[in-house]
Image (cartoon, helix red, strand yellow):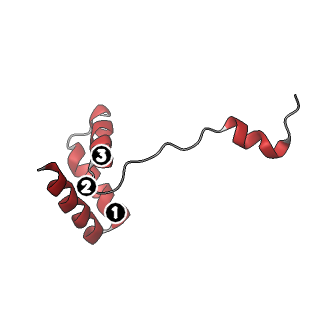
Amino acid sequence: MAISRSSVGSQIMKPPAKKPKLGTGKRFEKAVKSFSAKGVKDPKALAAYIGRKKYGAKKMAQLAAAGKKKSK
């Protein structure tokens, strides 16, 4: 069976993994686990710093509040 050049990428590459929704805290916890496995001193602080850089202080505060609300 011949493979055409146009379909090679779709046959080789896996579909991207689904990420949990923002505000659930699952992405944050996954990042914290990853950082602690790499030996980071304060993995929660690093995850929060990266989140603030990516989403901005206002959005990160909303996500943190939503995560706290859901954890109770």
Distance from label 3 to label 2 (Cα)? Answer: 13 Å
User: Judging from the image, what secondary structure is the residue with disc 2 in?
Assistant: helix
**60 or 71: nearer the viewer:** 71
Which residue extends farthest left?
72
Q: Amino acid at mark 1?
A: Lys
Measured along the vertical axis of the image, is residue 8 above or below residue 64? above
Measured along the vertical axis of the image, is residue 8 above or below residue 1? below
Relative horizontal placement of residue 18, taking residue 47 as reference (left or right): right
The answer to whether marks 3 and 2 mark residues whose Cβ atoms lie closer than 8 Å is no
Q: Which residue is mark 1?
A: 53
Q: Amino acid at mark 3?
A: Lys
Q: Position of residue 2 (x, y in %)?
A: 88, 32
Which residue extends farthest top?
1
Crowding at dot 3, Cα within 10 Å, few <14 / some 14-19 / many 20+, comes out as: some
Q: Amino acid at mark 2?
A: Ala
Q: Which residue is mark 3?
A: 26
| Identity of the residue drawn at 33% across and 37% down | 34
Q: How many marks?
A: 3
